[in-house]
Amino acid sequence: MGTEGFFKRRSLKADDTRRTRAAELTLRESLFPICLVTVLFFLWGFSYGLLDTLNKHFQNVLHIDRARSSGLQAAYFGAYPLASIGHAAWILRHYGYRAVFIWGLCLYALGALLAIAALKARSFGGFCACIFIIGNGLGSLETAANPFITGMFPVRPALCGPPRFSEIRINISQAFNGVGTVIAPVLGSYVFFNFSDEHALDNVQWIYLAIAVFVLLLATAFYFADIPEITDADMEFQARETHADADEEKPFRKQYKLFHAAFAQFCYTGAQVAIASFFINYATGTRPDTDSALGAKFFAGAQASFAIGRFAGVGIMKYVRPRWVFLAFLTSCIIFLGPSITQGGNVGISMLYVVLFFESICFPTIVALGMRGLGRHSKRGSGYIVAGVVGGACVPPLTGVAGDAHGDGLAMVVPMMFFVAAWTYALCVNFAPSYVKVLDSFGDTDIGLHGHQEDLEGAASGFGSTEKAAEEHVVNGDPVKGETTTVARPQ
């Protein structure tokens, strides 16, 4: 009975038709799951930063041009739609968040282990295939982690805390993504460019072995951890409580604000990845006496600027509505990218530093804003917003072609165009009444600020010390004691 009960309690299957108390977790109760999931943000930040550094490394070692080297980004980000609206979305809707976390980590580990064989064979195509598997793993993690942190993007905006703080929560978690993107190029500058090609490839193999071991240990931790599950019924509850004029009763195909957010994510992510992918090329191509190792250090500094921007953006969001901060930051990206097109050298690199600072909050804020008002469509809708990341597979090759033909400076015209396209969403969330009403309804709600009606006292001691109360509320998707509210499954 003990063993059977243990594995039953660890079941990855969540009942989506039952309402749990996870939708009403207070800030203290949500700290443990937020911290555990935040580790995932660091993981894919490190993977992303490592990929951008490998981009330049493979150009040197395998003697390929910029356009072909962007195949790494195409494989990595091209996998996201397959995960976010395919296998990961199916697992999320039919099992739950913990199942997707474990699935994504296992795919990540598999891709990392296979990458070692591809590196030994010096096969760029084989390595791209491994990166595609890793992209599927990370796409799965993002499909679950972003809505988990924001508070279930929709109406129940905060699986992990009060709805009004959803943008702040996801930007704090994503700040650790920025930390990962700083560490990776610094590491790359020492292990890729300061050794012979053969020795450098050996170093890369050890890095991917370490990644595989770490993520498998993390997957084990997720299996044994008590992670609250959010159900469609929970999301519907928050939708009602916020009194938002949302579109959840409309069929999924009519969720126009969601599709606009996904379009913005496509354009923004494409521009961000294009700039990061060719930053080292830009530094070595426009600044005299700059080799790849120094370029990687410059890139690490730019990623540090990106991480600082995340924390600065969070501080500003405490006093200014996130939608206004998003508009100001994305507008600044467009303004400061302009000089990097014509100047180059120290001036151009400095402008790219500023651009990365202002890029910082854009991706997570699009996620948080786009998820609001979806209600029962939340899990399905999150996949579409994450699928917008495929822009990172489409825009870098265009930028690479432009760089090969016209130089690194003029190549920045391509991401500029996509920033402008994403800007249309920033304008709508601030000036279109149908967008503003839904967003501000969630920003003004008090859900989660005062605890549960029955166990406010228990919440005061934190998530870890209220394990007993948590078990009464929800155990891996089991219904709350005394509450059996059901909702129709989304079709």
Image (cartoon, rainbow, N blue to C red):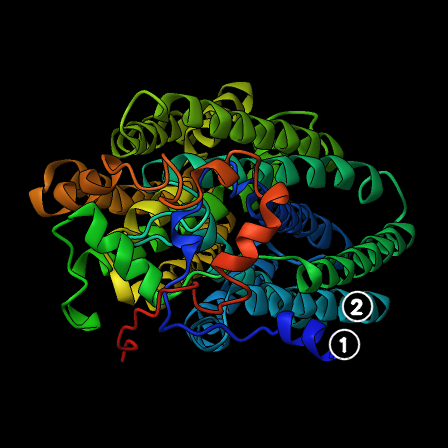
For residue 425, side relative to residue 182 (left or right): left
Q: Nearer the viewer, residue 486 or 112?
A: 486
Residue position for label 1: 3
Please name which of the two marks, 2 or 1, marks the residue nearer to the observer: 1
The quarter of the rendered structure image containing the N terminus is bottom right
Residue that numbered label 2 is attached to: 113
291 lies left or right of 350: right
Q: Residues within 10 Å of mark 1 (few under 14, many from 20)?
A: few
Q: Are marks 2 and 1 in contact (CB under 8 Å)?
A: no
Which image quadrant is residue 180 in?
Answer: top right
Left or right, 146 with respect to 101, comes to left
* Quarter where residue 32 is shown: top right
Examine the rendering and report whether any part of residue 121 can be seen. Answer: yes
Query: Please, what is the three-letter code of the amino acid marked with disc 2?
Result: Leu
Foreground pick, 448 / 144: 448
Mark 2 → mark 1, Cα distance in angstroms: 32 Å
- For the point 62% across and 40% down, which residue is it? 181
For marks 2 and 1, the one nearer the N-term is: 1
* Amino acid type indicated by mark 1: Thr
**Percent position of residue 92, x then y:** 47, 70
Residue farthest toward the left in the current orientation of the protein:
433
**Percent x, y of residue 296:** 69, 35
Q: Quadrant of the C terminus?
A: bottom left
Report x, y in % for residue 24.
39, 48
